[in-house]
Image (cartoon, rainbow, N blue to C red):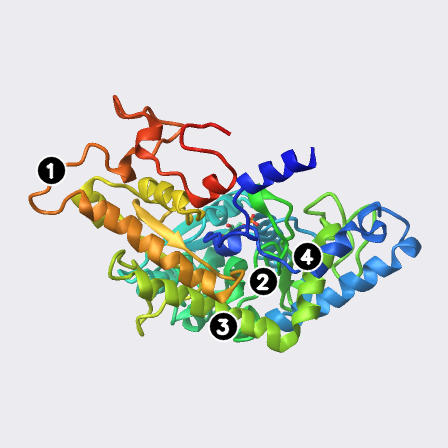
Amino acid sequence: MLRYLKRLQNKDLALDHSMISLGSCTMKLNATSEMIPVTWAEFGDMHPFAPIDQAQGYLEMIASLTEYLKTVTGFDAICMQPNSGAQGEYAGLVAIRRYHANRNEAHRNICLIPKSAHGTNPATAQMCNMQVVVVDCDDNGNVDVADLKAKAEQHAANLACLMITYPSTHGVFEEAVKDICAIVHQHGGQVYMDGANLNAQVGLTSPGFIGADVSHMNLHKTFAIPHGGGGPGMGPIGLKAHLAPFMANHAVQAIPGPHQGQGAVSAAPYGSASILPISWMYITLLGGEGVKRATEMAILNANYVANQLKAHYPVLYVGSKGRVAHECILDIRPIKAATGIAEIDIAKRLMDYGFHAPTMSASRWPARSWSSRPNRNPRPNSTASFQPWFRSARRSARSRTAPGRPMPTRSRTPHIPRPTSPLPTGTAPTAARKPSSRCRMCATTSSGRA
Ligand SMILES: Cc1ncc(COP(=O)(O)O)c(C=O)c1O
């Protein structure tokens, strides 16, 4: 049984074998010491509504993590209740609504959102009964400041907030971000910073310093909680002092800080508290200098990938100095136009080489583009080892269209089988597919024999 289970395990692609270039959005290669405490009964077996006098250790750990997060974000208060980034957005916008209502400005319901935003931003605004006004982006992927200014002025009387992601989902540090915050404040709005990409800020700057009023932190991205396949997560929000009274509380177990009677945003007072030890361990082990270095490495790795690949895959957006932030978006459209080979073909080819494919789609990103963010990689050289294979996948595509060359009927790249679409007639999956070293390792041949 043990050998059988080990064989199954070997067939899987995991971070102990390979880089997973989805980066912050997926599983991180964590130190075992960061993960062990979640297995302890003292954390794992505690009921969320255990009497407070029996949960003193938990509260101490939460208080300590709260202080860490305040330092990292530059905020005055932290609400530990939201279970995800999206729920953090909800908690943040609810706090903004309550703040406006408290000032007799409940009519403020316009939420400005740049085109580059993640889909959860407009969805959250809708859930909070706000009206979304979309702000344009310029050709470099930045918020179009003139458009923002015009829309903030136009909606000044009813402006509730702006939701802005920094660095943006286009993978660039918006250079005008402080001016953008100032424009919104000038017109009576609050700034919600989507902190999903906080891993490119930690130790170098902070949402509070930049001018945000409230922001979520995806602890399951920036602070080590593994979250493959949609969970589990923690998306606490940080708030400036003027919003702190309006953060979520809990009717069953009151939280000190926010006004009593504020509704909850999740079932338990401190969300999925049982996974907080992972983030606490991560920050405690790395310390201030260590978390800053992790940020620097994330930015360095993303720029390394962008530079190594730009001759083969154009990088869609860069800042004014030609650099990206925490990730880069590779433009597959020219390859598709010239060869008919799409991002999914290249993704499958990379999988044959034993690498997980990068993120291939995200709302608002131009079609046929590819996001790659190798943020916190297992080893520095795993980013490097990824590059030749990426370039080789590009060469496979290019070879299809070399001048004078007949269109190959057995070219590997487009014939790699996909479960959801029919295979080209007469092409057995095995004819095109070269087994990867991982497949060979686990004794599975291309004929499917195990
Ligand atoms: C920019 C951005 N905002 C918000 C979210 C939502 O976070 P979560 O998946 O934790 O709800 C994500 C997640 O990928 C994101 O990338």
**Residue furthest toward the top?**
425
Label 3 belongs to which residue?
296
How much space separates mark 4 and mark 1, taking CA atoms? 65 Å
Q: Of the residues tagged 3 and 1, which is closer to the observer? A: 1
**Is disc 2's CB within 8 Å of ligand 1?**
no
Q: Looking at the image, tell me whether mark 3 or mark 2 is earlier in sequence order.
A: 2
How much space separates mark 2 and mark 1, taking CA atoms? 58 Å
Name the amino acid type tagged 2. Val
- Position of the N terminus, as image quadrant, is top right
Frontmost residue, 280 versus 162: 280
**Residue furthest toward the bottom?**
289
What label does residue 406 carry, if any?
A: 1
Q: Of the residues tagged 3 and 2, which is closer to the observer? A: 3
User: Please, what secondary structure does the residue beneath circle 4 have?
Assistant: loop
Frontmost residue, 67 versus 226: 226
What label does residue 214 carry, if any?
A: 2
Asked if the residue at tag 1 contacts the one at tag 2, i.e. Cβ–Cβ closer than 8 Å, the answer is no
